[in-house]
Image (cartoon, rainbow, N blue to C red):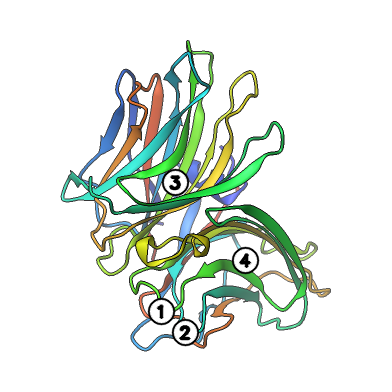
């Protein structure tokens, strides 16, 4: 099977040896961290996949966690979101954003301390020098009796980075949108997926 | 380069209501479970699939599971979301059902993130797709579950919660090893 999309590629990668490779893993230590940043990403893969769990230090309500590419803080991002919160399913879009949200529901510190939000994020054709970059993230939060039904969410995000100067993605910065720190024990692994 | 994405075990199963992976190595970062399933049943087009996990080769049968699911039925464009809390398994997966083997199979892709740490509750992200030849009421789903303990996971059970047997089904468990 030719690896095309991250999750599907993952299904076949086990028999292909080196087609799905670990690039780097970052685990946040004691005291938290303002961001999780992957730098010097090799341009030798077809696609990237991020897999991980996060929590932040926001106290005033639930949080979201987003990412930027190549330190681009301009309004060069957009995303679409489809989600269900246990009661209803809904969708929305965001244009001209300064980041792409990849963890759309992250519990605040007031909720159960052991609950971390998971995500699997595919970044397609990330090394292209002639195409805007697209991503897909399946993510959510579910925490048991300490959470209300409507703060439990399953989410599917698509995102676009449309910087007019098209370059390959060489760095990824992941950060809390409303808190100041990504919390201890948060961990994100970056993988590269090779094409034949 | 060392293998990062490895097959741990594959199972092919029929005439049983469940199948269980035990003694899952704790040496990976994440697990991915791929299930291709069918049940023989004449009275409905789908049955309820579920997943139960455990540590020390013992399944956790207590009310330590919560999950939230969003779905679309693909026929009328109906969509919705539902949640269950404090249940005894993750229960929003779906198994297509036919009176005979018509070639129909439903697919599950389930991600178990950081399954071997002893600090956090364990999360599962899943996507399922089930459709029959009449394109009727079964659906595609995405969901999230949380196992409300800090136990590691070394046992995973794939279940048919309607107590009907699986037929000609497969389940493969992969391990993903981060650097």
Furthest residue toward top: B100
The residue closer to the viewer here, B120 or A120, is: B120
Evaluate whether label 4 is on the same chain as label 1: yes
Label 4: how many Cα within 10 Å (few below 14, some 14–19, many 20+)? some
Residue identified by numbered label 3: B110
Picture quadrant of residue B177: bottom left
Counting residues from the start of the chain, the first of labels 4 and 1 encountered is 4
Q: Are marks 1 and 2 in contact (CB under 8 Å)?
A: yes
Residue A89, given in percent of the width and then of the height, sits at 63, 52
- CA gap between label 2 and label 3 equals 31 Å
Q: Which of marks 4 and 2 is in front?
A: 2
Q: Where B76 falls versus A169 (above or below)?
A: above
**Discs 1 and 2 share one subunit:** yes
Closer to viewer: mark 4 or mark 3: 3
The numbered mark 2 sits on a residue in which chain? A
Residue B160, relative to residue A44: is it above or below? above
Disc 2 residue crowd, few under 14, some 14–19, many 20+, Cα 10 Å? some
In x, y percent, where is residue B81?
Answer: 56, 48
Q: Between disc 1 and disc 2, whose residue precedes?
A: 2
> What residue does disc 1 label?
A110
């Amino acid at each position: 099977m030719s690896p095309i999309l991250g999750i599907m590629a993952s299904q076949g990668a086990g028999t292909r040896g080196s087609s799905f490779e670990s690039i780097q893993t970052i685990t946040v230590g004691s005291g938290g961290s303002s961001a999780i940043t992957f730098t010097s990403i090799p341009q030798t893969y077809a696609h990237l996949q991020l897999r991980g769990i996060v929590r932040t230090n926001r106290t005033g309500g639930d949080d979201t966690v987003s990412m930027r590419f190549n330190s681009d803080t301009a309004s060069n991002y957009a995303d679409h979101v489809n989600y269900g919160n246990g009661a209803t399913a809904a969708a929305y879009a965001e244009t001209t954003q300064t980041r792409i949200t990849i963890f759309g529901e992250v519990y605040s510190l007031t909720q159960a301390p052991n609950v971390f939000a998971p995500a699997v994020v595919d970044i397609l054709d990330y090394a292209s020098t002639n195409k805007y970059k697209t991503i897909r993230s399946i993510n959510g939060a579910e925490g048991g009796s300490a959470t209300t039904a409507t703060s439990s969410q399953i989410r599917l995000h698509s995102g676009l980075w449309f910087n007019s100067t098209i370059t390959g993605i060489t760095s990824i910065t992941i950060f809390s949108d409303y808190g100041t720190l990504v919390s201890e024990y948060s961990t994100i692994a970056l993988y590269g997926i090779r094409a034949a | 380069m060392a293998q990062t994405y490895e097959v741990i075990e594959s199972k092919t199963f029929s005439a049983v209501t469940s199948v269980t992976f035990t003694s899952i190595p704790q040496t990976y970062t994440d697990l991915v479970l791929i299930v291709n399933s069918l049940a023989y049943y004449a009275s409905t087009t789908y049955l309820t699939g579920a997943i139960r996990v455990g540590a020390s080769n013992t399944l956790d049968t207590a009310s330590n599971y919560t999950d939230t699911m969003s779905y679309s039925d693909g026929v009328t464009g109906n969509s919705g979301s539902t949640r269950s809390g404090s249940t005894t398994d993750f229960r929003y997966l779906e198994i297509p059902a036919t009176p005979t083997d018509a070639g129909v199979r439903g697919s599950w892709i389930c991600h178990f993130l950081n399954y071997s740490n002893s600090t956090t509750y364990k999360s599962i992200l899943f996507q399922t797709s089930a459709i029959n030849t009449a394109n009727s009421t079964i659906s595609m789903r995405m969901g999230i579950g949380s196992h409300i303990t800090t136990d590691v996971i070394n046992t995973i059970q794939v279940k048919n919660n309607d107590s009907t047997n699986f037929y000609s089904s497969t389940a493969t468990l992969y391990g993903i090893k981060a650097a």
